[in-house]
Image (cartoon, helix red, strand yellow):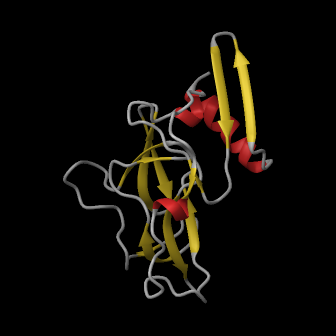
Amino acid sequence: MNHKELKELIEFLIEKDISEFELERGDVKVKIKRGGEHTVLHTRPEVPYAAVTGVQSAAPAVTASSEVPPAPPAQLIPEENLHIVKSPIVGTLYEAPSPGAPPFVKPGDMVEVGQVLCIVEAMKLLNEIESDVAGEIVKKMGSNGQPIEYGQELFAIRPKK
C-alpha cells in the first residue's frame, strides 16, 4: 500500500466518521484507530507511526487533560469560538520550511485560507498543513520536531468576522 492509497483511506474514514479500521492485504497490515477529541496515544520515539502501522505501544493512552495542565483562563477567552486546526495524519511536526528558517506562523499572525501553517512529515513525505479559515493565530499547540497523532490539535485560530 503506497502513501497515496493510505492517505485516501484515512480521508475516507474521516469522511464516513469511522473510528476503527483494520486491513490485511498480503504481508501488509494497516490498523487505524481514532480516539475521541481528548485521546492521545503515546508512542516510543523509535515507533512514530504506531497508529498507522498497527504496532502496539507499551505506553497507555491517556487523556490530554492529565498530560498537559489546563491553560490559564487569560490565554484563551472562553466566549470566543476558536477554530481548531487538527493534524490530518500521524507524523512529525515542523514549524518552518527548513532548519534555521523562521516559522510559517506564530501567535498573533493573521492567516488566510490556504496559507501554510506547518509541515507534518509522514513516511519521508512532507505534508503542508494549510489553514482552512482566515483569521488570527491565537495559540500554537505543537512544538518543532514533536511526534504528533492523527486528530491532534495544532493551532487555535480566531476567525475573521
The answer to whether 10 appears left or right of 80 in the picture is right
Q: Residue 97 placed where, x, y %?
A: 31, 51
From the viewer's perspective, is residue 123 above or below residue 131? above
Q: Residue at x 75, y 45 (%)?
A: 19
Q: Residue 13 placed where, x, y %?
A: 74, 42
Would residue 144 be visible to someone looking at this image?
yes
Q: In the picture, which quadrant includes the C terminus?
A: bottom right
Residue 10 figure quarter: top right
Q: Residue at x 60, y 28 (%)?
A: 54
The answer to whether 99 appears left or right of 82 in the picture is left
From the viewer's perspective, is residue 45 above or below residue 116? above
Q: Residue 17 placed where, x, y %?
A: 78, 50
Q: Residue at x 26, y 48 (%)?
A: 98
Q: Nearer the viewer, residue 73 or 53?
A: 73
Q: Residue 14 placed where, x, y %?
A: 72, 48
Q: How many marks?
A: 0
Residue 108 figure quarter: bottom left
Q: Residue at x 54, y 55 (%)?
A: 152
